[in-house]
Image: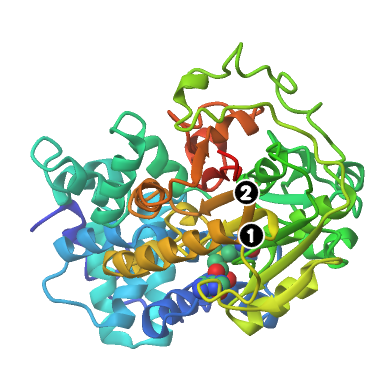
Amino acid sequence: MRTRGDQGAGGRGGASRTRKPRRPVRDQARNAAFDVVRAVDERDAYANLLLPRLLRERGIRGRDAALATELAYGTLRGLGTYDAIIEMCSDRAPDPDVRDALRLGAHQLLRMRVPPHAAVGTTVDLVRLRIGQGAAKFVNAVLRKIGSRTIEEWVPIVAPDPASDPVGHLAVAYGHPRWIVSAFRDALGGADDLTDLLDADNARPLVTLVARPGRSSMAELEDAGAVPARYSPYAAYLTEGDPGQIEAVAETRAAVQDEASQLVALALTRVPLDGDGDELWLDMCAGPGGKAGLLDAIATHGDLAGLDGAAGGAPDTAASPQGSDRGGPEASAGGGGGRPEVFGGGARLMAADVQEHRARLVWQTTRDAAVVTADGTEPAWRPGVFDRVMLDAPCTGLGALRRRPEARWRRDPSGIAELGKLQRRLLDTALDAVRPGGVVAYVTCSPHLAETRVVVADVMARRPDVEQLDARDYLPEVDRLGDGPHAQFWPHRHGTDAMFLVLLRKRPTEQ
Ligand SMILES: C[S@@+](CC[C@H](N)C(=O)[O-])C[C@H]1O[C@@H](n2cnc3c(N)ncnc32)[C@H](O)[C@@H]1O
């Protein structure tokens, strides 16, 4: 394929034939980004763990650190798109290290405001220094072809025709594996705002903090430079700076936590229970302790913010269902619609995780909780003793792809069936663990139907002792949570991870 870029492929930036080639420049930010992309490709490293370490070790700060981050994360997110374009522009399959350099160059050319000569020149220098002169020539030629068109011009060339293969088209255009696009479309119930979701998935999430009630406060987070978030009365956005430097975070009185993670935990505490007693709560899959940290604080001190901050306060849900897509009380499968309550404190949380090192993290995050290493499918606790149970089930994590730029390419649909079996067993034991009249929250950080509604429907079909509540009734401050009775958060609608929540009540025994 010949493009405008072919003409200059052999030379560099218009340099004359007789001029001595200049010495390649070592660019700290680009080298760090290359190392991260290589490590992810070669040895399955996690970019969000490796990059901060490299930046620290190499003393890369400020604008260079921001550039390295955008380069590494953006390149990893867009791999699928860039690979299709690279393939079209190469006459042979590049070696893995050369391909990673090409991906970095393609990201700069197509999605960053780096001038084309700088994007090509710096990548060629990097390849010359790190790989070799022959590879540098090849990279120069391929990048010039890539730079001859914009991303908008490339997509129709490399992506399947949207009319005959809409999912395949979106997969290439928005840099997501096809099966994930398909799963998102199914979970959204159509393609109306699918591209908004894919776009949101490609954007870096805001850093959201939680002020654990009784341990920190919104005022303390605001003093540290954060601003109150959209929904949760305990959430604040940190637009700049390192959250680890905030005293409350360093002392685990506050933490980094997605807003939807806070809200699903809050929703569990807001359900009025049938029968006496609200003293013992269980977080069955608690590691590393995000939700346990909030539940532990509320169990001890109560929901100190109450519902005053919630949009419209505590609604009379029977009379006035909220939000454009709320179905009202008739949407509740078990007729369990109700008013949210504010928990007053005085309960104790038990937090469990099957992995010891994750249970240890929960121990560090909580203050008053009893923390155990235990397999939720073979419970170490007596059945029917807990008033509230949080089951934040192990899942594919498709709802948090924004956080780990490479994650989407690592996930594999073949694991879903196995995970589904575990999710069903855990939900069964969670329902066994709760007392009659008590409530279980089933939560996943995935909107995939096979991990969410299908799991709940299967378990409920053989559990006449359980009724499903309308989870949206307990999140009056949040609209557009779906048709119910579950609640589904979305990055493009709520600015949160795509967290899924079902609330199940164990029927009181006299019924
Ligand atoms: C989605 S994560 C939980 C996240 C946590 N709730 C939070 O907010 O930080 C799922 C957890 O389930 C744990 N897990 C997996 N299988 C389990 C089992 N059979 N019993 C208990 N925990 C399990 C995993 O080790 C993992 O820590």
Q: Give residue 386's position: percent from left, percent from top.
A: 69, 58
Asked if residue 260 is positioned above or below residue 475 in the image, the reply reads below
Q: Quadrant of residue 473?
A: top right
Q: On the picture, is 488 further left or further right than 142?
A: right
Residue under label 1 = 384
Amino acid type, mark 1: Gly
Q: Quadrant of residue 283?
A: bottom right
Asked if residue 161 is positioned above or below residue 286 in the image, the reply reads above
* Residue located at (53% from left, 32% from top): 470
Considering depth in this image, is 495 or 17 the residue closer to the camera? Answer: 495
Is residue 332 visible to the viewer in this orientation of the structure? Answer: yes
Q: Secondary structure at mark 2?
A: strand
Q: On the picture, is 50 further left or further right than 395?
A: right
* Residue located at (40% from left, 50% from top): 111
Residue under label 2 = 436
Asked if residue 208 is positioned above or below residue 37 in the image, the reply reads above
Q: On the picture, is 1 further left or further right than 467?
A: left
- Image quadrant where one finds the N terminus: bottom left
* Residue located at (23% from left, 66% from top): 142
Q: If the picture is divided into quarters, which one holds ligand 1?
A: bottom right
- Image quadrant where one finds the C terminus: top right
Do the CB atoms of the residues marked 1 and 2 lie less than 8 Å apart? yes
Q: Give residue 249's position: percent from left, percent from top.
A: 83, 61
Q: Residues within 10 Å of mark 2 (few under 14, many from 20)?
A: many
Q: Earlier in the sequence, mark 1 or mark 2?
A: 1
